[in-house]
């Protein structure tokens, strides 16, 4: 095979690998961000559960203060009832005492409801914290694996880049610029031709003379349709038929003798 053609095949492989590795490395920040986003959602659930408990406890303290206020009012009204001179004043104070006692019962009902709510909220918090702990361990493992994969990609990228640069320096100076122009236009600069006589990249049939010249693989020939440099890939040779062993070939004779 023509040396430039052979190196172009290797160069295209190096180009594809360096592009793949660059893309994979570039995905790491987005992958880590997606992992962190998943963890942030669970953290938000934990904070939400904590905030709900804090709000309920705050409301309870407020209700307890209201109960104290109403109790003080009841004590004051009862003291005043001892000094009133008319039934109307006494009835009015009793009514105020009744209103205050009703308000106290209302506050106590709300406190009870809050206590039940806190039980549920604490269960939610424990579940969220357990989930957060599990996810944190899993996510740290995922991040470590992603970084390890990227470190390996960086190493491979350096190797492929060195190989790519070496190949470019070894190919004839007039061939590399042509290859680069086709790659820029077509995303690939070289294409196989198989026994059917078609350029694999653009699927266009070659002229018979061009096909015969490409089959030799001894010089740089471009596809008339897409411009890619062509090289011939012969069909695989058929596997040889299995040979019969001496035992197999002599068996019929032996059978005949036995008859």
Image (cartoon, rainbow, N blue to C red):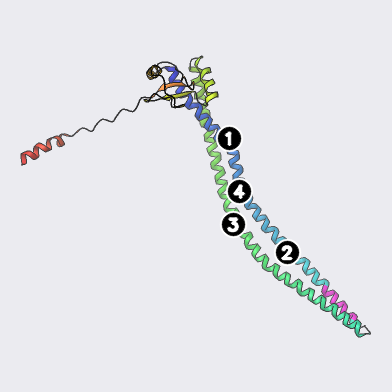
| Position above or below: 186 against 47 | above
Residue at numbered disc 2: 57
Q: Which residue is mark 4?
A: 38
Instruction: Please provide the residue range marked out in magenta.
Output: 70-80
Q: Is 172 situated left or right of 59 in this image? A: left
Sequence-wise, which precedes: disc 4 or disc 3?
4
Q: Residue at x 88, y 82 (%)?
A: 91
The x, y position of residue 140, in whole percent, is 57, 46
Q: Position of residue 108 (x, y in %)?
A: 74, 72
- Give the mark nearer the N terminus: 2 vs 1: 1
Q: CA distance from mark 4 to mark 1?
A: 20 Å
Quadrant of the drawing holding the N terminus = top left
**159 or 209: nearer the eye?**
209
Asked if the residue under mark 3 is in contact with the one under mark 2, i.e. CB atoms within 8 Å, the reply is no
- Pick whichever of labels 1 and 3 is earlier in the sequence: 1
Question: Mark 4 or mark 3: which is in front?
Answer: 4
Element marked by disc 1: helix
| The C terminus: image quadrant | top left
């Amino acid at each position: 095979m023509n040396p430039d053609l052979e190196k172009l095949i290797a160069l295209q492989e190096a180009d594809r690998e360096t592009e793949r590795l660059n893309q994979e490395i570039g995905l790491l920040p987005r992958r880590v961000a997606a992992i962190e986003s998943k963890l942030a959602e669970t953290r938000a659930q934990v904070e939400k559960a904590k905030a709900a408990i804090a709000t309920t406890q705050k409301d309870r303290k407020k209700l307890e203060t209201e109960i104290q206020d109403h109790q003080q009012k009841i004590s004051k009204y009862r003291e005043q009832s001892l000094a009133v001179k008319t039934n109307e004043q006494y009835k009015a104070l009793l009514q105020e005492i009744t209103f205050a006692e009703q308000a106290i019962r209302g506050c106590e009902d709300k406190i009870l409801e809050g206590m039940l709510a806190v039980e549920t909220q604490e269960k939610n918090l424990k579940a969220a914290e357990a989930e957060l702990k599990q996810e944190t361990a899993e996510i740290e493992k995922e991040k470590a694996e992603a970084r390890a994969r990227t470190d390996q990609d960086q190493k491979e990228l350096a190797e492929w880049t060195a190989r790519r640069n070496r190949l470019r320096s070894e190919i004839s100076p007039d061939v590399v610029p042509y290859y680069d122009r086709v790659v820029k236009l077509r995303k690939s600069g070289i294409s196989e031709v198989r026994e059917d006589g078609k350029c694999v990249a653009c699927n266009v049939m070659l002229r018979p003379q061009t096909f015969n010249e490409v089959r030799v693989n001894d010089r740089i020939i471009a596809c008339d349709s897409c411009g890619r440099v062509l090289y011939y890939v012969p069909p695989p040779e058929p596997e040889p038929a299995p040979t019969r062993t001496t035992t197999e070939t002599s068996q019929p004779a032996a059978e005949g003798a036995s008859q």
